[in-house]
């Protein structure tokens, strides 16, 4: 039986896989912080997959993470990665820029959105950033364009930020139950503010947020990702589609696709590579 592992699975996982996430979204998902390594033996996996995880790691940590993926793979094992496609983001940004400069009013909203895709997720200092504020618009001037870019994830984001905005406007938001950890962090922040001053306290809060896993720490295109995989010892890196894979039965797992076969995250770059055999 093939041993398949889905790292940082979030809410998309399959019972045929070993699913691992720091915050399990369902039964059968292993709770584990991947920054401490992958909790599997060396050379025991036939395939390792992770979607929209790598861009949240700092560059040096990304290399270490891929080396850890190589460790748990068998010789001949497959790594499959999905990340935001920097090349496509840049091309879409330039197309929107040219159209906006030519006076296309509709393209102006697309330009604003592409600027957010390019910069907001790497520079934001609070959860949701400017992207959440943009999606809160109702009507959203370029909703079709956004959904073409980020698919079902975009639809969920739009519904979520609008629902939260409406609840806030109606006074319907209930106070969150604070965990012991959040209480300790709050007390620590207040003490820091008293001892070091407001600017130091703000810097600490921003630093904690930026290391908390939401922001994009780096971006990849088909050249840089293939080069990184090669540097980590993988061979034969190649671009795939959401449904195409060397992993047997891939399309049936619906990890990169919805039930109708459409991509969950159309803005993705999908790439696979192979761990060389001992004689290669």
Image (cartoon, rainbow, N blue to C red):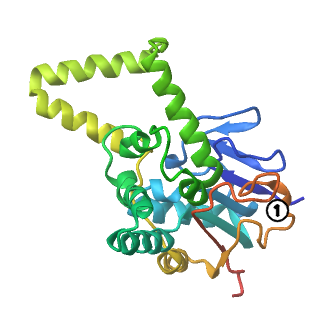
x and y percentages locating residue 178 in the rendered image: 44, 14
From this viewpoint, is residue 211 visible? no
Label 1 neighbourhood size at 10 Å, few (<14), some (14-19), many (20+)? some
Furthest residue toward right:
1
Furthest residue toward bottom:
280
Position above or below: 240 against 126: below
Location of residue 110 by image quarter: bottom left
Position above or below: 277 against 112: below
Q: Quarter of the image containing the C terminus?
A: bottom right
Which residue is denoted by mark 1 in the rendering?
Answer: 251
Location of residue 95 by image quarter: bottom left
x and y percentages locating residue 141 in the rendered image: 48, 49
x and y percentages locating residue 64 in the rendered image: 48, 62
Q: Is residue 72 left or right of residue 220?
A: right
Q: Nearer the viewer, residue 127 or 63?
A: 127
Q: Is residue 1 left or right of residue 161?
A: right
């Amino acid at each position: 039986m093939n041993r398949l592992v889905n790292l940082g699975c979030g809410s998309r996982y399959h019972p045929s896989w070993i699913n691992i996430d720091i915050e399990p979204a369902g039964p059968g998902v292993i709770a584990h912080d991947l920054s401490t390594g992958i909790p599997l033996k060396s050379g025991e996996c036939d395939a390792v997959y992770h979607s929209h995880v790598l861009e949240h790691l700092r560059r040096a940590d990304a290399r270490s993470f891929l080396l850890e993926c190589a460790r748990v793979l068998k010789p001949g094992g497959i790594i499959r990665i999905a990340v935001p496609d920097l090349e496509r983001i840049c091309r879409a940004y330039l197309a929107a820029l040219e159209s906006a400069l030519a006076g296309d009013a509709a393209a102006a909203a697309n330009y604003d959105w592409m600027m957010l895709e390019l910069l907001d997720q790497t520079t934001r200092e609070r959860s949701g950033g400017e992207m959440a504020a943009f999606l809160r618009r109702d009507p959203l001037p370029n909703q079709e364009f956004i959904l073409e870019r980020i698919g079902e994830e975009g639809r969920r984001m739009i519904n979520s930020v609008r629902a939260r905005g409406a609840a806030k406007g109606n006074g319907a938001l209930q106070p969150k139950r604070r965990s012991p950890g959040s209480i300790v962090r709050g007390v620590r922040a207040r003490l820091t503010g008293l001892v070091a001053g407001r600017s130091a306290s703000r810097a600490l809060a921003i630093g904690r947020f930026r290391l908390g896993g939401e922001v994009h720490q780096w971006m990849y295109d088909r050249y840089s990702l293939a080069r990184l995989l090669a540097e980590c010892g993988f061979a034969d890196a190649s671009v795939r589609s959401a449904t195409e894979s060397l992993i047997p039965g891939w399309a049936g797992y619906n990890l990169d696709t919805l039930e109708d076969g459409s991509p969950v995250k159309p803005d993705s770059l999908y790439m696979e590579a192979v761990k060389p055999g001992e004689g290669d």
